[in-house]
Amino acid sequence: MSVPLTDQATTILRTNDRGGYTVPTAGLYPYQWNWDSAFAALGFAAFDRHRAWRELETIFDGQWADGMAPHIIFRKFDPSYFPGPNIWGSRTDPPSSGHSQPPVVATIARWLVETGNADDEKRARALFPKLIAWHHWFHRARDPDQTGLVSIIHPWESGRDNCPDWDLGMNRMTVPNDLGDYHRRDTDWVDADERPTHETYDRYLTILKFGRECGWDHTEVYRNGPFLMADPCVQFVLMRADRDLLALAERFGETEAVPMLQGWIDQSRRGADLMWSDTVGGYVAREMRTGELSTAITNASVLAFYAGAGTSEQRATLIEQARQIADQCRYVFPSWDPRADGFESRRYWRGPVWSVMNWMIARGFSECGYDDLAHRVQRDTLAMVVQSGFFEYFDPLSGEGLGGPDFTWTAAIHLALQAEHGAQAAA
Ligand code: GLC
């Protein structure tokens, strides 16, 4: 008899547990990643709420003095991953990477509080100041001119590493001759045609070199670094997380934080307009130094609903695009519009579907009253796993599982969807 998928998912979380934090998948990603842990907590909550909170709390073991929660914490050196702590050179304890990742934690913390009891509330209260410090850092360091639009300084900060969105910023960059030789480890584990190209990797490392050489001075990296773009994923995840933090602040009687959070939310709503493209009919990434906009809808564009961004006209335009894209795919939601140039159904963030994005997208659709689309996204997310297993990402045209196997966040989202919507999503 085959093992039920929820049991398989539970086993994956337990197997990837390194004691208080999980690795995304053994081998390919042997450290703690920020937003992976946030989603892992959602999965743990289905069977062990204490462990769910540990996963969120350990993210802040790596928090910098200025509030930034880094995207990777290198707890125990593991040579199977490149670039490791020495290449980042951030000189923190524990060693960490030099930039952040989409801040999902406050959203998951609020969800745990609202579905839990007094213990959940106690754990959330303890995290509250750390969350405020992190969000504050985003609004300060990534938007020093207070435009309402936060930037990213590396494609990895978006969590959507090689999306065509970043081509605008990456193509402007000059790769220095003294980058040196390096041996990528990711292609030891996964087929090269499912991973970023070598040219892309050179550019990733160019940004790391700049950051390392200026001691990861955020102002210097923002003003003069090799890459500066605005990302609908970070913008909308932060805006949503600010709203969730506001709800927690009100619940906890943290009255001083309330006007500050309200200000951030209003500012982000205005800033989002700088990413609106009439040509595309949606929010897209923006190259910050030239103002150029990207050329297609992604799975980050449709997070506008999850954030609560946009006028009713903008929402109507975007939802129409989302429906057209859904018609093109066997499984939604693709990371790049299949109708646009540059779509590659198997290559990482240039086409494939990712469960964690789908979890956020479905919430947004449902909250804005697009229940048919929300159900489609939930159903597809479960169905891809039924067809192919717990892979890192999936081909939207065939449902084939791609990238790393036994993946923590795919297992976690499966558990969360089963717990929240199993019966209705399977219907
Ligand atoms: C890749 C993904 C990123 C994720 C990391 C670990 O870099 O693009 O979003 O956090 O892997 O799973």
Image: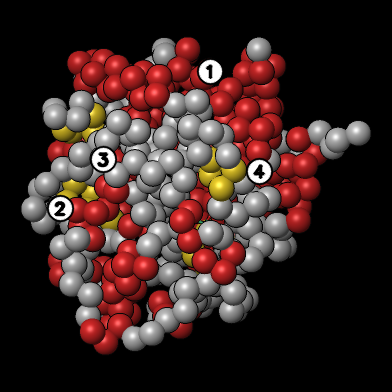
Give the answer, above or below, for where 423 lies relative to 300. Answer: above
Mark 2 or mark 4, which has the lower sequence index? 2
Percent x, y for residue 200? Answer: 33, 64
Residues under numbered marks 3 and 4 in contact, where contact means CB atoms less than 8 Å apart: no
- Find numbered disc 3 in the image and state the secondary structure of the residue it sits on: loop
For mark 3, what is the residue?
341
Q: Is residue 107 visible?
A: no
Q: Residue at x 36, y 54 (%)?
A: 162
- Between 199 and 422, which is closer to the camera in this rendering? 199
Rendering quarter of residue 78: bottom right
Q: Earlier in the sequence, mark 1 or mark 3?
A: 3
Q: To which residue does mark 1 refer?
A: 375
Residue 53 location (% of width, % of height) = 64, 48
Query: Residues under labels 2 and 4: Cα distance?
Result: 36 Å
Give the quadrant of residue 320.
Answer: top left
Q: What amino acid is at disc 2?
A: Met
Residue type at mark 1: give it.
Answer: His
